[in-house]
């Protein structure tokens, strides 16, 4: 998967961004495999808890490790355009298909939490 790289980004920042994006893809693909089309991310014990949401039920699924937590949040905020707003969208390739993720951030116990709702993108001509 190719990532567009800005020329003013330091190589270390590019590596962090790529690792964070890869972790986001892992989490979202895991959710799709489990039948969920919505994912919640919330801070807990310095890690980022991942919840698969099926209907109104959120099931704890995995964790994003502490060393990736801030980079994953920064990548999510950047890709979904959440720097100055609480809702945005981003495109992502998952399991060989194109998806649009609607990303919403809200406050939960004094920290930001995120909900991502996945919708498969229909290709032109279909």
Image (tube, grey):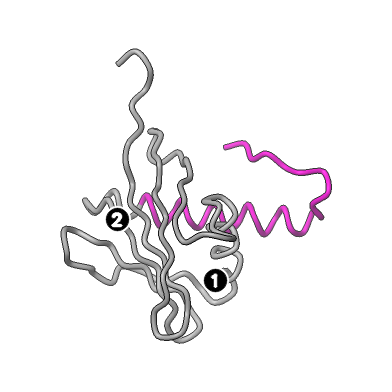
Residue 125, horizontal then vertical, whole percent: 34, 13
Q: Nearer the viewer, mark 1 or mark 2?
A: 2
Q: Which residue is mark 2?
A: 38
In this view, 64 is above or below 6: below
Q: Quadrant of the N terminus?
A: top right
Dividing the picture into quarters, in which one does residue 115 lie? bottom left
**SS type, badge 1:** helix
> Mark 1 packing: few (<14 Cα in 10 Å), some, or many (20+)?
some
Residue 9 at x, y percent in the picture: 79, 52
Q: Earlier in the sequence, mark 1 or mark 2?
A: 2
- The residue tagged 1 is 69
Q: Residue 73: x and y, percent?
A: 54, 65
* Residue plotted at (36% across, 32% down): 121
* Magenta-colored segment: predominant secondary structure: helix
Location of residue 87 with respect to 41 vertically, above or below: above
Q: Give the total number of marks visible in the rendering.
A: 2
State which region is magenta: 1-29
Nearer-the-camera pick, 125 or 87: 87
Is residue 40 in the magenta section?
A: no
Taking 123 as reference, is 105 above or below it? below
Image point 60% across, 63% down: which residue? 74
Q: Residue at x 56, y 52 (%)?
A: 81
């Amino acid at each position: 998967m190719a990532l567009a790289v800005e020329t003013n980004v330091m190589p270390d920042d590019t590596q962090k961004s790529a690792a964070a994006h890869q972790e986001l893809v892992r989490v979202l693909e895991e959710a799709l495999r489990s039948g969920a089309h919505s994912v919640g991310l919330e801070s807990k014990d310095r890690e980022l808890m991942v919840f698969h949401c099926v209907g109104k039920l959120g099931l704890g699924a995995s964790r994003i490790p502490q060393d990736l937590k801030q980079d994953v949040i920064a990548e999510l905020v950047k890709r979904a355009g959440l720097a100055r707003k609480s809702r945005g969208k981003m495109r992502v390739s998952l399991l060989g298909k194109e998806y649009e993720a609607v990303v919403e951030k809200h406050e939960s116990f004094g920290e930001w939490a995120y909900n991502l709702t996945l919708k498969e993108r229909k290709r032109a001509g279909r």
